[in-house]
Amino acid sequence: MKQFEEKVGSVLVANIDIHEVTVLDKGYVRYVDHLGSDERVVEAARVSYKAPSKGEQQDKKLLEYLYTNRHTSPFEQCSITFNIKMPIFVMRQFVRHRTFRLNEVSGRYTEFEPEFYVPSVWRSQSTDNKQGSEDSDELDHEDLTSLTNLACTYAYNHYKALLNAGAAREMARIVLPVSYYTEIYVNCDLHNLLHFLELRTHSHAQKEIRDYAEAMAEVAQKYFPWTMDVFNKNRR
Amino acid sequence: MKQFEEKVGSVLVANIDIHEVTVLDKGYVRYVDHLGSDERVVEAARVSYKAPSKGEQQDKKLLEYLYTNRHTSPFEQCSITFNIKMPIFVMRQFVRHRTFRLNEVSGRYTEFEPEFYVPSVWRSQSTDNKQGSEDSDELDHEDLTSLTNLACTYAYNHYKALLNAGAAREMARIVLPVSYYTEIYVNCDLHNLLHFLELRTHSHAQKEIRDYAEAMAEVAQKYFPWTMDVFNKNRR
Amino acid sequence: MKQFEEKVGSVLVANIDIHEVTVLDKGYVRYVDHLGSDERVVEAARVSYKAPSKGEQQDKKLLEYLYTNRHTSPFEQCSITFNIKMPIFVMRQFVRHRTFRLNEVSGRYTEFEPEFYVPSVWRSQSTDNKQGSEDSDELDHEDLTSLTNLACTYAYNHYKALLNAGAAREMARIVLPVSYYTEIYVNCDLHNLLHFLELRTHSHAQKEIRDYAEAMAEVAQKYFPWTMDVFNKNRR
Amino acid sequence: MKQFEEKVGSVLVANIDIHEVTVLDKGYVRYVDHLGSDERVVEAARVSYKAPSKGEQQDKKLLEYLYTNRHTSPFEQCSITFNIKMPIFVMRQFVRHRTFRLNEVSGRYTEFEPEFYVPSVWRSQSTDNKQGSEDSDELDHEDLTSLTNLACTYAYNHYKALLNAGAAREMARIVLPVSYYTEIYVNCDLHNLLHFLELRTHSHAQKEIRDYAEAMAEVAQKYFPWTMDVFNKNRR
């Protein structure tokens, strides 16, 4: 995890560390802010029985009990905000998680930069999973990468040509490939983050979104260490 | 509205009319099924006061009262299911409506057909709205269309080349442009459909999603005529 | 399951069977309407891979695969509407399921009838579960029941006295106990119904809501038999 | 707004002010924590057009534009957590706002204290609104209050009698009236808080929940002053 001193925008950060995890060739997951803590989860649960904390060991046990017995509401009292840069085709999977609250850069307002995800390592169609992929010794990775570079460059040139010929940004962008990078702010509550991580770190999920999920888990580990330990130990 | 006798899949339709509204150059909105009726809305509201219906005129008045006073829950008792074919960039706006329940064709399972949205009429950047577009006399529509055709053909050829070189479908597809057509099943409850229609038939919405919204409104008119009349009369 | 010919309201039912399952002493779960079918679930899933059905046996297998692998979105394409009469304290647990869409009788509009849940069989505090209860040989059931009858009668008399003294309905009702019966219309999509059933038929759930959950499962069995079979076989 | 130095639980607060607004006779709204700020709303919106802030005056204008044009997603990036003590019948209205994330004290775990809402000022049935109430000169407030006190005392005595006779807490509580106080932790995002405030500060809402809504607005004013100013100026 890269740490550096920098402002995300003008107001978001004061004297706290900022974390960035690099994902794919040009993407990232950055920490922006969070609400609550592992102790908040426990406390939200304790409101149910109005009992005070009996110390850290008991709190950790309670937290594990909550997770493994699917008492999910206390985890919803916490949330974390990320700033993520990811390709459109990953974003299309990401956005299916409907409890996420997000804002995305708009191709109607802004002209896109020529930033595309261009894999250097390729996978072939899986032989035992109709939707999946697998590593392969028989692929010519360099050739596939250079084909992709060509396709992206060509698409971007067309995008610029349409803009230059007077087309509105919202129309010109339709020729851009789903490999281009978009950027979001996203706030996830802790329960739904864990649910996302469970589904999207699963071996059936596409490798690229798995990489983003792992990066999000890495960032969350710092702010919710007990919860992430329990998750890693018990993920269903 | 085109009407025809055809099965949508193998089980969905029996002896009912099927409606299709054509949208853009290759897209459509098709009716699949619906739950409830205008009367159901009224009845769900009446459960609150346990009063029987006093006839159609009173029911219509009540329905208008509910809508204009934002008593939204009775409208949630009804829903409608569409089968929609739309370009990815429209889908990306569509999916932001988080109460919609949808299933989409997957580019991980299936190889895509070379079907792209290629506009024949273009718009230029709006001069008074930073995100919008406007009609223009100065655009060379034929030229823009042929540029777009070229871009799509080129992208599709690269997609096929990547597949032929052994890349998995989920990777090869990353070079496809956001103009390619995807297909969904979507179930919307009536309250959230009206909310969607309000936002997406608004002049600030992109023309292409407005066309889909209007088509959905046209289909809904047949199954919920009182509600759609009230909506059209009172849309905020 | 009781079957009878009766109208629920004026418009809901035509020539279909109506089902009612009696719950507790004065409550019920009634079927109102549903959208979709087991085949719809399968078809919604198939839209992902654009493959036609290969017959009922394959469809059932796919449905089980979807459920056990938590492909939940196809189940959201179906829904079922119930009319339920239940005590307030059960309703307070019920309403925590936020995807349910419901309308409830209002104590601000209508004067309540003296209908309360009065158990004839009682349970004592569980010895091994702080929140639960268990059967007991040492309880004087008749005595507990008659205490409860007294309490409810007394509360209802106060309610009427407050009304007679000129208090608004919305204020007078505050003395009514949480055992009084309320009535709702509720529409649940099939995925979230199964999730509810899993949590609320669990031995940790309060006996009274378990009874409602079992009644809802019994009604759903008729309209979604494959899904309910898969659920019963695989419930986590 | 009362300010005092006190811990809410054991871990929630460090060196920050705590706010409490008293509501009804024994209830309150307390501030627990919040995520984001007015500037975060603006920044989340600016991610769409990737433009830097042009100073406070412009930021405030943008915030008002967002609110009045229903660009709701930037407001969802912020949230606020309250600890609220309210009667059950208010809670039953509160919980209909399904985006709220809440934890509530459980009557299955804990024995309830004899704390009930007992109004000292009463309202009569509204003459022009079937569900509402209005001030009245003809009510004997003292008499109504003492009737209510009696009813609550009687109910509580029955609750204790059922417990003493061995009934489980989850069963004994059924005789308690909806005037008894419960306690929740609730986290609301800023968009949905404003939506709640709009509906529940409306003259059609019951007076008691209006009081809670006003108290929540008062607390929110301190942490999101620009947003609350815009809301108060423009509430629909």
Image (tube, coloured by chain):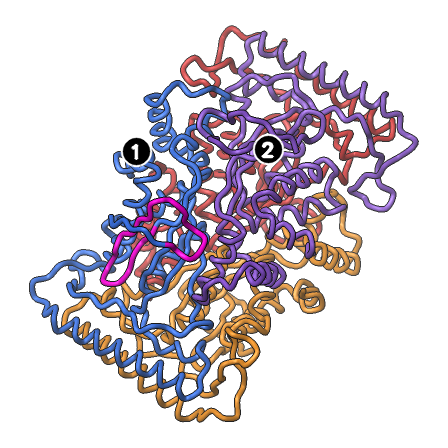
Chain colours: A purple, B red, C orange, D blue
Relative to D72, is A203 on the left or the right?
right
Relative to C165, is D68 on the left or the right?
right
Measured as percent of width and height from the top left, residue B146 is found at 67, 12
A144 to D71, vertically: above or below: above
Residue placed furthest toward the left = D137
Local secondary structure at mark 1: helix
Q: Is residue C43 or residue D67 the one in the foreground?
A: D67
Numbered range of the magenta stretch: D7-30
Q: Is residue B112 or residue A196 the one in the foreground?
A: A196
Q: Is residue D21 magenta?
A: yes
Q: Amino acid at mark 1?
A: Val
Q: Is residue A13 or residue A77 the one in the foreground?
A: A13
Mark 1, residue position: D230
**Label 2 crowd (10 A; few <14 / some 14-19 / many >=20):** many
User: Residue A19 shows which numbered tag?
Assistant: 2
Circle 1 or circle 2, nearest the eye: 2
**Quick check: do tags 1 and 2 share a chain?**
no
For disc 2, the chain is A
Measured as percent of width and height from the top left, residue B40 is found at 43, 57
The C terminus of chain A appears in which quarter of the rendering? bottom right
The N terminus of chain A appears in which quarter of the rendering? top right
A136 to B65, vertically: above or below: above
Q: Residue B141: tell me if it is visible.
A: yes
User: Residue shown at 69%/49% (left/top)?
Assistant: C45
User: Residue shown at 32%/58% (left/top)?
Assistant: B55
**Label 1 crowd (10 A; few <14 / some 14-19 / many >=20):** some
Q: Is residue B52 magenta?
A: no
Q: Residue C34: tell me if it is visible.
A: no
Residue B121, by quadrant, is top right
C91 to C153, vertically: above or below: above
